[in-house]
Amino acid sequence: MSVTSWHRCAVSILALGAALAATPPASAQNAPPDGAQTFLGRIILAAGRARVAIETPQAVTAVEAEEIEREQAATPNELLRQIPGATGFGGAGLTGQFFNIRGIGTNTASDENRIIVTVDGVQKYSEQYRIGSYFGDPELYRRVEVLRGPGASLLYGSGALAGVIAFETREAADFLEGDAQTALRLRVGGNTNGGGTNGSVILAHRFNERLEALGAFSIRREGAYRPGGGGAAIPDSRLSARSALLGATWRMADDSDARLRFSWTRWDSDGQRVPYSTDLNLPVFGLIDRRVQDDTAQITFENPAADTPWLDTRVQLTFSDTQIDQRNATAQNPSPFFFDSIYRYRTYGLNARNTITMQGAGWDNYLTFGLQAARQDRRHVAGGMPRASHPEGESDRFGLYLQNEFVAGGFSAIAALRHDRATLRPTAGVPAGFGDAQRRTGTAASLALRYQLTADFAVFASAARTVRLPTLDEVFDSGFGGGTVSLGLRPEIARSIEAGFSWQHQGVLSGEDSLELKLTAFDNDIRDRIERPVIPGAPSFQNVSRARIRGIELEAAYEAPAWFGRLAVSHIRGVNSTTGDRLASTPAPEAVVEFGHRWADLGVEAGWRGTFVGGATLAAAQPERFSGYATHDLFVTWRPQNGVLRGAEVQLAATNIFDRSYRNILDGPAANSFPGRGRDLRLSVGRRFTW
């Protein structure tokens, strides 16, 4: 990070400290909202047994519904702004999103499967070139959990070199308070930069003590936004999208913990004359009409069986279907990339696991074991024909995993082991004689330790060995440079270590406040890295390099009845160990500072957030200096607690208030990337009715 950016960051951190130090004694009228807690004090569900974030020996963060709504995000990537080491990025419109965790994740398709993305436990996957891998509307989410690093991810797959992003959709219980049987929430909003509009309706109903259901519908339109610094509007950033959600929960008996949960979501977007490449400003690629329909469904049986320590069962059936239909390309290029095309990824899955709890004098043990199985059907037709650079096929994946957590006093240890097998069968688009199925196997393991030295201070460390199996595209692609398939492709192997400490203290400035922080350092060494070297006549993908990614992450949070604050810092260094070059997937150093004040008796919360990004040099043939920048946002939320307006909500935010020109370094060289959005005022108004 540049000296100037670090100076700005330091000044903002000192300002936060001064504001906190000046906090007046909390009064009874300024009590925090029910359940208010810091980010580090939240319960993490995706890492296995439910644990408080700061007490987890891994880097995990949860974003709750309150922050999601306050963000007024148009895309899922905006929900990751306050999570160190995690970044969402992508194109100019409401289209597929790219994710990056700890320097892994680029804007090309082959890198995204190193990050596992789930919705209600359903793994999402799409790898069309430069379109983005994930589609979704933040209006439908109640929670997002991010697990950073492979050691925290073995319950999901051995290939999660970077980590896991787990989205959870809304449930009826989120809206049914007290004795209410029905709840209706209406919400509308808009923004000034681009003239975007959005609206949603959510209906929840409790049929009886055992059955409740929810339905939601959202529509969102984005106009051509204007970048910071007074630039001209980007005409190709217009897009419209519609989303829907159906969910239900059925408790199977009055005297049982067993329940069935169901959810189905659909994303439908229609882009007319949008850039072919959603992340690069390349006029040579031209424009295209693109329709995306993405479905996600799951049904889950859960039986915590509180009276039976050896039975805590969860069985889930999943379905995911992503279809992208492209027509009427304007690119003057004979490549099949620009033919009228259909891409489709349809996946059926099963995930079953059980936890056995054992207890003794001063110790507890939680043994979790399970299996995952999935079949993916991959289809692609361009100009009426399959294409060699995106072959069709089927992949079957099967994994067994085991995780044991032992807790005794202030010591805890989590050991995990996983074995995966993949069978890849091409069905079209491969050269003659290369149609035989290919099989790959991999084993991953991790160990994480934590020790509570004092009531406030704890240290932790972990080590993991992770194996990412090649995908069908990487093995059978033969469409670049006149190459051939990559039957000899080896799995990627990553060895990573993490270490850090956490500190938490109650009663810092008053008897009702808390301050928590967690520092994590990591070192990730990846061997047999799979890349596309584009060498004429050679396989399209090869094990061509090693990579080493090191970094540090800091999270700090302050919570008081009237004040709140948060700090998230990440600094990552990624290097191609073979060439010594900086990895293009390395994000710029970043610090996010936020603090605010709440007037609980008025139902008002207001705050400021500053994002400070350091400079760096791009990893390109001709290195380009990426300039650091700082943006500032303001936000106000009003939720009347009494009277006829109880249940109403008003959200007002001003982002990039100084209209700063900036770009995301992960989008690549300035000449080929879209600049960030300039000053924008966002307003949303909602009302909840219950009866």
Image (cartoon, helix red, strand yellow):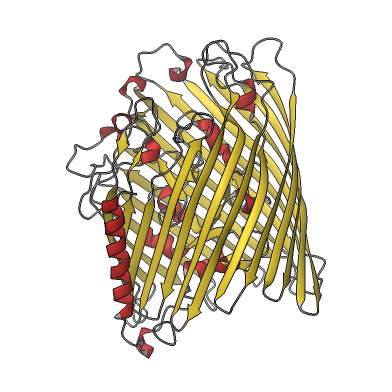
**Residue at the spot 39% in from the left edge and 13% down from the top edge:** 333
**Residue at the spot 52% in from the left edge and 25% down from the top edge:** 342
In the picture provided, is 394 more to the left or to the right than 286? Answer: right
Q: Where is residue 674 in the image (x, y as percent from the top left)?
A: 31, 36
**Residue at the spot 61% in from the left edge and 47% down from the top edge:** 496
Q: How many marks?
A: 0
Q: Where is residue 424 in the image (x, y as percent from the top left)?
A: 71, 27
The correct choice, above or below, for 210 with respect to 214 in the image is below
The correct choice, above or below, for 335 with respect to 261 in the image is above
- Asked whether residue 125 is in view, the answer is no
The correct choice, above or below, for 473 with respect to 468 in the image is above
Q: Quadrant of residue 408?
A: bottom right
Q: Where is residue 101 in the image (x, y as percent from the top left)?
A: 50, 47
Along the line of sight, the residue nearer the viewer: 409 or 126:
409
Q: In which quarter of the image is residue 598?
A: bottom left
In the picture provided, is 312 more to the left or to the right than 157? Answer: right
In the picture provided, is 6 more to the left or to the right than 554? Answer: left
The correct choice, above or below, for 602 with respect to 589 in the image is below
- Asked whether residue 435 is in view, the answer is yes
Direction bottom: furthest residue: 28
**Residue at the spot 61% in from the left edge and 41% down from the top edge:** 320
In the picture provided, is 625 more to the left or to the right than 444? Answer: left
Q: Where is residue 152 in the image (x, y as percent from the top left)?
A: 63, 54
